[in-house]
Image (cartoon, rainbow, N blue to C red):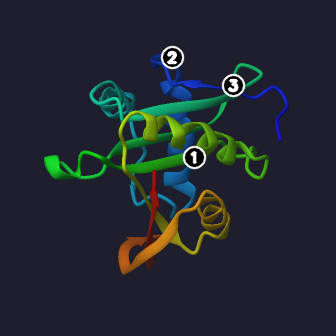
């Protein structure tokens, strides 16, 4: 694990790094079903959601003044009855995988979301993705269903497992 890792709330100055990390996963993996890289206008619009509701939190993990990963809780669905349920997002910079950064981010994020009034955390995980599954299960997420072949990327269909955690 990176010894000088600092976890903090994301700021606008982090958006280029966050965008670079996410765009890597768009271009190289099936982990996200976005097909084209995001531009900075999209990223700024996305970032605005984290000031709209105290349950919506975005953290970054930083080491040596470089963002190594980020994790957040976001709106699950627009309808008001869903407001205490949050969907999680988590990405680690290429080359920083396997260092415990994702776990550190969730260790900080999930209690903050609960303290802010979130009742359930939900995670959609493209399958297969053993590393993500192990990390989510380590924090108590449990599989509640699988959507078969709901995403088409890289000339094939992908399943998504839906996991939930009572906060």
Asked if marks 2 and 3 touch (Cβ < 8 Å), the reply is no
Q: Residue at x 61, y 62 (%)?
A: 132
The tag on residue 91 is: 1
Rendering coords of residue 119 (x, y %) = 36, 49
Location of residue 80 in the rendering, given as x and y in whole percent from the top left corner = 15, 46
Q: At 46% from the left edge and 50% from the top edge, which residue is drawn?
A: 167
Of 40 and 57, the residue lying toward us: 57
Residue 155 horizontal/vertical position (percent): 44, 76
| Contact check, label 1 and label 2, Cβ < 8 Å | no
Label 1 and label 3: CA atoms lie apart by 14 Å
Q: Which residue is mark 2?
A: 13
Q: Element at badge 2?
A: helix
CA distance separating discs 2 and 3? 11 Å
Q: Earlier in the sequence, mark 1 or mark 3?
A: 3
Residues at marks 1 and 2, CA–CA distance in whole angstroms: 17 Å
Q: Which residue is mark 3?
A: 66
N-terminal label among 2 and 3: 2
């Amino acid at each position: 694990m990176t010894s000088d890792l600092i976890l903090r709330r994301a700021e606008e100055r982090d958006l280029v790094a966050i965008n670079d990390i996410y765009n890597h996963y768009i271009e190289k993996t099936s982990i996200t079903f976005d097909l084209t890289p995001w531009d900075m206008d999209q990223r700024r619009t996305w970032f605005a959601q984290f000031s709209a509701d105290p349950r919506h939190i975005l953290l970054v993990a930083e080491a040596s003044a470089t963002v190594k990963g980020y994790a957040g809780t976001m709106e699950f669905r627009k309808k008001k009855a869903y407001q205490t349920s949050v969907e999680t997002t988590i990405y680690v910079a290429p080359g920083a995988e396997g260092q415990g950064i994702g776990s550190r981010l969730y260790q900080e994020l999930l209690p903050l979301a609960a303290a802010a009034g979130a009742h359930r955390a939900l995670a959609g995980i493209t399958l297969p993705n053993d590393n993500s599954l192990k990390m989510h299960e380590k924090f108590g997420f449990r599989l509640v269903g699988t959507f078969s072949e709901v995403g088409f990327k890289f000339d094939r269909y992908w399943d998504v497992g839906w996991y939930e955690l009572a906060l």
